[in-house]
Amino acid sequence: MSQSIKTQGKLSSFFDVLVQSLKGHEVDLTSISIKRAIILLAIPMMLEMAMESVFALVDLYFVGHLENSSHAIQTVGLTESVLTIIYSLAIGLSMAATAVVARRIGEKNPEAASKAGMQTIVIAVAVNILISIAGLIYARDILLLMGASAETANHGTTFVRIMMGGSIIIVLLFLINGIFRGAGNAAIAMRSLWIANIANIILCPIFINGLGPIPAFGLTGAAIATTIGRGLGVTYQVYNLFNGKNALKILISYFMPDFAQIKAIIKIAAPAIFQFVIASCSWVFLAELVATTGGDEGSAGYQTALRLMMFFLLPAWGLSNAAATLVGQNLGAGHIDRAEKSVFQTLKYIIIFMAVVSVVFLTCGHLFASFFTSDAKVIEIASRALKILSIGFVIYGAAMVFSSAFNGAGDTWTPTKINIFAFWLFQIPLAYFLAKYLEMGPTGVFIAIPTAEAGIAVAAFILFKKGKWKKTMV
């Protein structure tokens, strides 16, 4: 009887925390239990990142049923590969924002946290204007450079122009969510992605297939729907920044450039951006290598597998982001031991999650792939990729947690150096050797990915235990 009461009590407590995490009540994350703090942050963060991955899957689903779907799937996949460079800028800035905002919140200085967050927005807008212009002008050249055929490039040029031209919306969506995560209010970040995705799911079939007076834009319609959806998400974020109901109280004066503050943010953001650019450029190279060794079908299969993989990896990344916020806030509060314990507790949760995902892909990968395309060859390649990639999922998760911990502490150089070695000096040469010299084609690329991730996880663990991150000043 007593055991039953205890079980019911634990379930009741868990559901209380679950409801609290979804509602987004602000609490002092440096004083409650570590497990509770992780759950409060991780659940909305995981749902947020799951929603981010849904963008690509929704586009992939609808364009996968168009005529000449292999060209459409390849365009979406290759564009996403290029956009990962934009994501790198957004993620790097959001990491800096999370680190600085979390540290100031931990120090109980919300005014400084608010100002730092707004200065990152100033930086983002200034940099992204140049990127958007380049994307508008060189859209077709970008697809050709990525290994797309001339026919695919012709099909996808307008799609790329819209996605690249609206990339400032992508950056703001990531960045402002990073600000809210640093403040410990992950629920607002989650809801902004819900709004963006619901809009995208509704608008995609309308703009792709047409409805009433709205013509069928085909592939281009996917870009229109996604950009509008993300724009609505950003609108919701901006509303919450200025409504005065959260720990962050925003004044217009905070948007005036403060060059000392900007310099401090760039010091953290630059290596963080470079950190993700390194990884992104590696993914771009791998996508090009698959396209040249596997043709249009090989490329479409690989891109389908990546989209499916990211659907599960992004929630894991959301879980790892809980470690970033807790490390930043606890270092700000002077609780160094608590910061370290938070990382290892998060690691336990992510190992369990990724182990389950591995089993799912090893057993059902072909079923997931067949949902997005009816092309037998594309399904076969996607299924093979998922089986190989999923072997390293637990390793990916561990690497994510340690990297997030470094970034949350403001030590963005450590994971950047790891990425340089693992991706550029190991993964790319290995993939090229397997795919070209051993003539393994796309399979060689698939094998190189988990191999490199294993190296990242081991190196990150060793450097984390050394503890240099504990002394980082933000």
Image: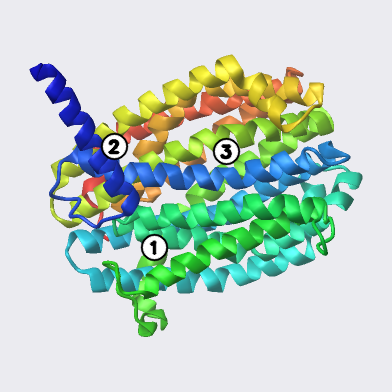
Q: What element carries label 2?
A: helix
| Amino acid type for the residue under numbered disc 3 | Trp
Mark 1 or mark 3: name the one nearer the start of the chain.
1
Residue receiving disc 2 = 464
Q: What residue type is labelled 1?
A: Lys
Q: Which of 83 and 304 is in front in this view?
A: 304
Q: How far apart are marks 3 and 2 (CA)?
A: 22 Å
- At 21% from the left and 40% from the top, the residue drawn is 36
- Which tag is nearer the camera, tag 3 or tag 2? 2
Residue 441 percent location from the top left of the image? 75, 23
- In the rendered image, residue 435, in percent from the top left (x then y), is placed at 72, 24
Q: Quadrant of the N terminus?
A: top left
Numbered disc 3: secondary structure: helix
Tag 2: residue type?
Answer: Phe
Q: Going by the image, does 471 lie left or right of 370? A: left
Residue at the farthest left position: 2
Q: How far apart are marks 1 and 3 (CA)?
A: 23 Å
Tag of residue 267: 1
Image location of residue 20, percent across then percent down = 27, 48
Reply above or below: 247 against 407. below
Location of residue 426 in the rendering, given as x and y in whole percent from the top left corner = 56, 31
Which circle's residue, 3 or 2, is located before the other in the chain? 3
Identify the residue shown where x is 29% and y is 35%.
346
